[in-house]
Image (tube, rainbow, N blue to C red):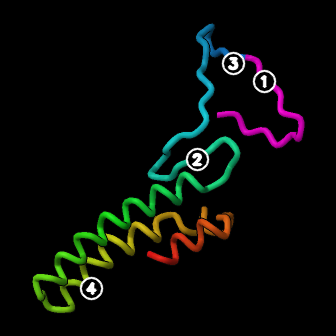
Amino acid sequence: MVVDFRRARQDHSPLAINSSSVEIIKNIKFLGVHLAENLTWTLNTSSITKRAQQCLYFLQKLRETNLPSPIITTFYRGTVESILSSYIITWFGNCTAFDRKTLQTI
């Protein structure tokens, strides 16, 4: 991945290691965090939102079965809360206002 903050975008020359061409990519998922070449966190936020919404569906189904509140709370903390807080110190400070609002709705 090439991270370039220059205002005038230029094509970068191909990188070769041991005479093998290295592919330039736009984004990558590394240790569960989506990193983009422009260092925005929109892709990461949308991924987290999607995963959390899937778990919220199961949380709703658990509530419909009238389980005790401590079991539902444990499920929430173990799934939804852990997804939302994973690496939050790394990416939340640089999120856009739209991304923050999306996360807060969950």
- For this view, does 65 lie left or right of residue 22? left
Which of disc 2 and disc 1 is earlier in sequence? 1
Label 1 sits on what residue type? Asp
Whole-percent x, y for residue 31 in the image: 46, 49
Which residue appears at 66% of the width and 14% of the height? 16
Q: Identify residue for label 2.
A: 35
Magenta segment boundaries in residue numbering: 1-13
Looking at the rendered image, the disc whose residue lies closer to the viewer, 3 or 4, is 4
The answer for how far apart the CA atoms under marks 3 and 2 are is 20 Å
Q: In the rendered structure, does residue 26 fall within the stretch colored magenta?
A: no
Which residue appears at 27% of the width and 85% of the height? 73
Looking at the rendered image, the disc whose residue lies closer to the viewer, 1 or 2, is 1
Label 2 sits on what residue type? Leu
> Residue lying farthest bottom?
69
Q: Quadrant of residue 90?
A: bottom right
In the rendered image, the quadrant that contains the C terminus is bottom left
- Secondary structure, mark 4, is helix
Crowding near pointer 2: few (<14 within 10 Å), some, many (20+)?
Answer: some
- Secondary structure, mark 3, is strand
The answer for how far apart the CA atoms under marks 1 and 3 are is 12 Å
Q: Quadrant of residue 88?
A: bottom right
- Secondary structure, mark 2, is strand
Number of numbered discs visible in the structure rendering:
4
Query: From the viewer's perspective, is residue 92 above or below residue 62?
Result: above
Q: Identify residue for label 4.
A: 73
Whole-percent x, y for residue 82 in the image: 38, 70
Which of disc 2 and disc 3 is earlier in sequence? 3
Crowding near pointer 4: few (<14 within 10 Å), some, many (20+)?
Answer: few
Label 4 sits on what residue type? Thr
